[in-house]
Amino acid sequence: MTGLCGLMAEDIKTAQELAQHQKSISISEFFEKNRHLLGYDNKIKVLLIIVKEAVDNALDATEEARILPEVYVKVEELDKEKYKIIVKDNGPGITKAQIPKVFGSLLYGSKFHKLRQNRGQQGIGVSGAVLYSQLTTGEPTEVVSSTGDGKLHRYKLKIDVKKNEAIIIEEDTIPNEGKWKGVQITFVCEGIYREHKQSVLEYLKQTAIANPYAHIIFDSPTGRAEFQRGVEKLPPEPTEIQPHLYGVEIGMFSRMLHDSKARSISTFMQTEFSRVGKQTADEICKKAGVDPVTHPKRVTDEEVVKLVKTIKETKLMRPPTDCLSPLGEDFILNGLKKELAPEYMAAVTRPPSVYRGWPFQVEVGLAYGGSITEPRIMRLANRVPLLYQAGDCAITKSIMGIDWKRYGIDADKLPTGPVAIFVHIFSVWVPFTSESKEAVASYPVIIKELKLAIQEAARKMQLYLNKKFRSVEAAKKKEMFRNYSDELAQSLAALTGKKKADIYKILMELAEEMYISGDLGGEEGEPVIDKSTDKKPKAKKKPVGEGGAEGEEMEEESEGSEE
């Protein structure tokens, strides 16, 4: 007995010793040791990520303020593998009190809880860039902001990783003598500058295509590149929506019930979810065996499980889609034309669909020939280019699932001809595969919508290519006929006694009638643009559960097993 008590006392002592070493960590401390999760895993890539985070914030801020974006980017080499990055915009600026919070705290921002289309989602991006800069060079990030109040607010700051808050190194406010309003950020970090298919330059070029209303200037270590504005208007502004019941899970539903100020479970569903009426809310409660007038805080765990299960089995209205802001065919074609100058373009915007209760849409642009000499694939999510992890992305998998030869394009899984493929998915919550937001998750409904959009655009391109190839063949035959016409005219003149010149003229007229090259459309030197819409497919109504497009399923042309 004494030995057992001694053993128990020893076990207690060990547990107490272990408990002394257990403690929580801040999100900043976590990413300090796991920066690869944010994409900072090689020195060539980090320059792109920092520019991307700052430019994305600049474009979001200007669009929310309904200002045509003017963005200036500079990457300057200070020393071997040490660079200064400057990003400046003409947005509404950031108030003085918010600057340390926005740049000095990870997971601080306004977009995480907003259900509307945004480039940023998590509140990690730009503060993650501040953290990487101080980790690699030890230097603070400088932020200068003006909100149009006649003052410039300047901060130099770092992040206290233990507390996940800003350490202010310098702070001052000076008169703003000019009329500039916006934000300028200066980072000093380790990196390697290269110009290739995954570089800062390529990111800005694709950003200019996807945001043709933005004027972007880039001063790089190799010179200046300028991307002019192609259109003088902004796309429609998305509105904020409430979550949809199809997207709710047991834990989330339980938490929302506990936090709700509603006085009944029926009112809770009507006021805190999109497009749920009293009749639908009462029907869900009745099927789940829960009294609709039950107070949300009195709903048991067992009742929550029954309610969520019933929701999945109930036909609900689609969520509203005004939370999305499509670029539209005109913007896509304008962006492709001004940056790629192709000989042919086609664009398609699919109707909204739904995954896990979140509305999303897909847009595709195809460009052929002209300055395009090799295949290029542009993957974008919420107007942001995705340059890494292509093999893990639903967009790449969808492109690989298309039989491109069927549409007149040489391919070996991916196209090998002179074609550019622009694929844009946008949603209130894009399902990225990681925190670095470099690839889109392969939900079946997303793959389906991507492939249908690509196929529709490819059919348009096929019509053009068929006509182009027929014209080329006609021109070859005409040229061959002309090569033999002189000798044929001479022989016929000898046989008939008529003049050779008259016979040759008749032969040339005959060649023109027999081999008409056809009109490809467009003025000489201008790209051909195709915005025609194929015959609309029939729609059949059906109830939709988890992961489906709610309310209807489109009967589209398929490619056998591809659909």
Image (cartoon, rainbow, N blue to C red):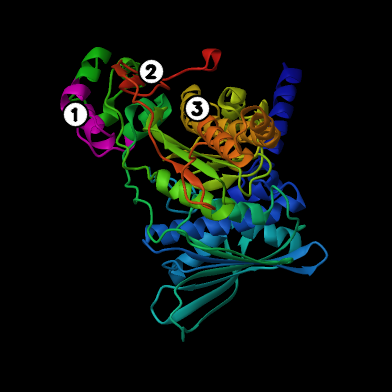
Q: Which residue is mark 2?
A: 555
Mark 3 residue element: helix
Instruction: Determine the main secondary structure of the stretch shown in magenta.
Output: helix
Closer to the chain start, of discs 2 and 1, is: 1
The CA span between labels 2 and 3 is 13 Å
Q: Is residue 137 left or right of residue 422?
A: right
Please identify, in this view, whether the residue under mark 2 or under mark 1 is nearer the observer: 2
273 part of magenta stretch: yes
Residue 164 appears anywhere in the view = no
Closer to the chain start, of discs 1 and 3, is: 1
Numbered range of the magenta stretch: 258-282
Q: Residue furthest right?
A: 80
Q: Which residue is mark 1?
A: 277
Which of the pair 502/379 is nearer the observer?
502
The CA span between labels 2 and 1 is 30 Å
Q: Is residue 314 left or right of residue 404?
A: left
Which of the pair 132/530 is nearer the observer?
530
Q: Residue 46 at what x, y percent from top left?
A: 70, 53
Residue at horizontal 53 percent and vertical 48 percent from the top = 384
